[in-house]
Image: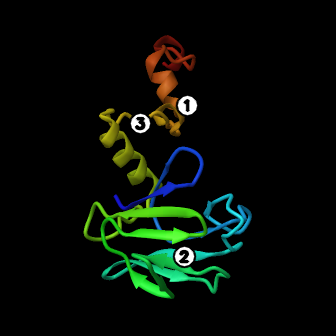
Amino acid sequence: MPSLTLNRAKGEPNRVELLGPVIIGRQAAVCDVAIADAKISRRHCRIEPVADGWLLTDLESSNGTWVARAQVSERLLRDGDKIRVGDTVIQFFERSASPRRRPVDPTHALELARAVQGESAHDDFAELAPRPMPRAWDQFAENDSPGLSDTQAG
């Protein structure tokens, strides 16, 4: 799965898995990946899946987006590329040829997650499924009918 490793000037590196398009910037309210760095714009750049891989786009940031010591406005990322935004270096890792897509059906997503974790596909909610209602005559078939006896009928 494609991912980013954020190496800040101070602090431990953070790894972010790419499940879809992400906006990188300084303000958490408008960004998917927020970085506390005064040299980064509120909405600095975007990384999104495209047919050929992952595309990096600068969002008209004040200090620019840099890859391999060159300022870029748009660039198709390659495995191992180092992106510099402000004082932060972000390394891009592409583990698969195409971006992974989420299953549309949430039940399928749950099955996939359980398979990855080695869990069984047991349905935790099976007991909540509706059960058929017993019919009134099924109850009488089990017991003796309270209706007329053979002696009363004749």
Question: Can you say whether 88 is above or below 109 in the image?
Answer: below
Viewer-closest of 53 and 37:
37
- The kind of secondary structure element at disc 1 is helix
Query: Residue shown at 49%/31% (left/top)?
Result: 127
Q: Dot 1 corresponds to which residue?
A: 136
Q: Dot 2 corresponds to which residue?
A: 46
Query: Residue shown at 59%/64% (left/top)?
Result: 87
Viewer-closest of 27 and 30:
27
Question: Can you say whether 59 is above or below 39 in the image?
Answer: below
Question: Can you say whether 58 is above or below 142 in the image?
Answer: below
Give the percent coordinates (x, y) of residue 98: 29, 71
Query: Residue shown at 34%/58% (left/top)?
Result: 1
Residue type marked 3: Asp
Category of crowding for the residue at label 1, using alpha-carbon neighbours closer than 10 angstroms: few (below 14), some (14–19), many (at least 20): few
Residue type marked 1: Ala
Q: Alpha-carbon distance for marks 2 and 3? A: 38 Å
Give the foreground label among 2 and 1.
2
Give the foreground label among 2 and 3.
2
Q: Dot 3 corresponds to which residue?
A: 123
Query: Sequence order check: which comes first, mark 2 or mark 3?
Result: 2
- The kind of secondary structure element at disc 3 is loop
Q: Alpha-carbon distance for marks 2 and 1? A: 64 Å
Q: How many marks?
A: 3
